[in-house]
Structures are given as C-alpha cells and as structure tokens.
Image (cartoon, rainbow, N blue to C red):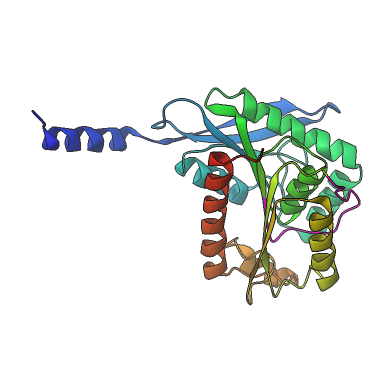
Amino acid sequence: MRYPLLGLLMATSLAAHAEIQTQEIPYTAADGTKMVGYYAYDDAVEGPRPGVVVVHEWWGLNDYAKQRARNLAELGYSALAIDMYGEGKNTDHPKDAMSFMQAATADADAAKARFNAGLDLLKQQQQTDAAKLAAIGYCFGGKVVLDMARQGVPLDGVVSFHGALATQTRAVPGSVKARVLVEHGSADSMISLEDIAALNSEMVAAGADYQFVNHPGAKHGFTNPGADKSKEKGLDLAYDKQADERSWANMQRFLEDTFNNPRP
C-alpha cells in the first residue's frame, strides 16, 4: 500500500532540515603563502558530487565570491571559493585591487600553483567527486580559469564571467583539456575587440571545445549586483540582471552537460 501523504511529509521534513553548510578552511600554497578557502555544500545531497572552484574578482575573496560558492552548493555541487591573493585579503579600493592582481599574475607558474592548491583542497573534501571538477571565475578570476584551461590543468570545464581574455600563456594544439565557456558583455569597455578575436583564434587553433556568449549591452561586472557602486570610483562597471540570470543559466546547462558527457 502506498502512503502519498506520508511520503510528502517525509520529503517536507527532509527539505526543512537540509541546509547549505559553509566553512572557512585555511590552506598553504606551494610558496608558503597562507590562504583561506570558503567551502559550501548542501548536506541534503548524499555522497560525493562534482566539485567547482570559484575564483574571485580583482577585489579578492569577498562576500560576492562566497555567495557564488553558496549558489553552486544550492545546485548540488561541492563548491570552494579559493584565495588567489593570500590570507583571504580583499578590498573595495581600485588601486589596491590593481596592486593585488598584478602581484598575483606577475608569475604565471606561481599563479598556477596557487590555483592548484585550492583545487587540491576541494578534492580533499569528502563531499567532492574528485573525478568531476570544474572552475568558474569572475573578472580577474575569469582570466585565471581561462589560463588554467590553456595550461592543461585537469578540469572538465571552465566558465569565465566578464573575464580578462588576453594572456601571455597562449594555448597550443592539444593543451586545452577542459571545455570552455566564456560569458561576455558586448559593452565591456575593458575588453577590446582585438582581445576577443585573439581568443577565438587561439581556441580554434588549439582545438578546444569552446563557446563564446555575447550579452548585448552588458558592461564589465554584469553579474555582480554591487558593480554599480564602482561607478563612484570612476570604473565603467554595471550590473545587468538579464545578463546575470542568462549567463548563470548558461553555466548550469554547461556544467550539467560537461559532467554528464565528459570529453573522451
């Protein structure tokens, strides 16, 4: 005999007790720098699930990056917002952000080592299926995840949101193992048409599984509701609700397809 009401009550009870669990986890990069990761997962999901690294904007590991980790946890992923600057530092001052970013990207090998330290931490979490890994990044973080794909870091997929596209570490044929999705704003004054054309040529020449999505009228920072405040600092940033929601939906489909249909 079936008891649909009992099943409904049990499901409701489970949903009521399900929560997104979060914690800050200290770790150390290969160069000895002390880092802080922000980890999130849904305790209602049983067993290991795909892991996704989140790489912050040039502001550093702030509340926005942590929110995106929680958003991914709500989708059922094991998510870790990593620290590329050290000691979890962040700022809301453009000059400081520029200084932090330049220091973090001055040495490509060191940047890769810092990313890999975060990726290793994610793989160590019991909720993570270490055979299914991806990374998403915003602004500076978009550049980081693209560079990791270019350098063949073992990821199934990467997603760049309004990320910097230029690089000194160009992909070569066969080097890009991850699927690549770039979500870009057509009105992004910080990215040149030459940068876009160069990325397209680079990815095609490298034989990458690559998608580029242009959001009409969207400016740099279009996913971040706090971007509009940066106008006061003289930065050409703006939140775009439609582009934010569409790019997030694109990411969801991309990750689902990537994890369910891995590249051979």
Residue drawn where x is 59% and y is 48% of the image: 63
Residue drawn where x is 62% and y is 69% of the image: 228
Residue range highlighted in magenta: 159-173
Give x and y (percent) for residue 107.
91, 42
Q: Determine if the magenta segment contains residue 160.
A: yes
Q: Quadrant of the C terminus?
A: top right
Nearest the eye: 123 or 220: 123
Give x and y (percent) for residue 211.
67, 58
Q: Main secondary structure of the magenta part?
A: loop
Q: Which residue occupies the extreme front position in the image? A: 264
Q: Is residue 193 above or below residue 264?
A: below
Nearest the eye: 42 or 216: 216
Q: Determine if the magenta segment contains residue 144.
A: no
Asked whether the viewer can see residue 174, the reply is: yes
Q: Is residue 226 above or below residue 85?
A: below
Q: Which residue occupies the extreme left position in the image? A: 1
Q: Quadrant of residue 248?
A: bottom right
Give x and y (percent) for residue 116.
76, 32
Is residue 15 found left or right of 102 in the rendered image? left
Is residue 259 found left or right of 42 in the rendered image? right
Give x and y (percent) for residue 39.
57, 34
Residue drawn where x is 87% and y is 54% of the image: 167
Nearest the eye: 179 or 108: 179
Q: Is residue 29 above or below residue 192?
A: above
Residue drawn where x is 18% and y is 34% of the image: 7
Q: Quadrant of the N terminus?
A: top left
Q: Is residue 41 above or below residue 205?
A: above
Asked whether the viewer can see residue 58, the reply is: no
Nearest the eye: 110 or 88: 110
- Badge count: 0
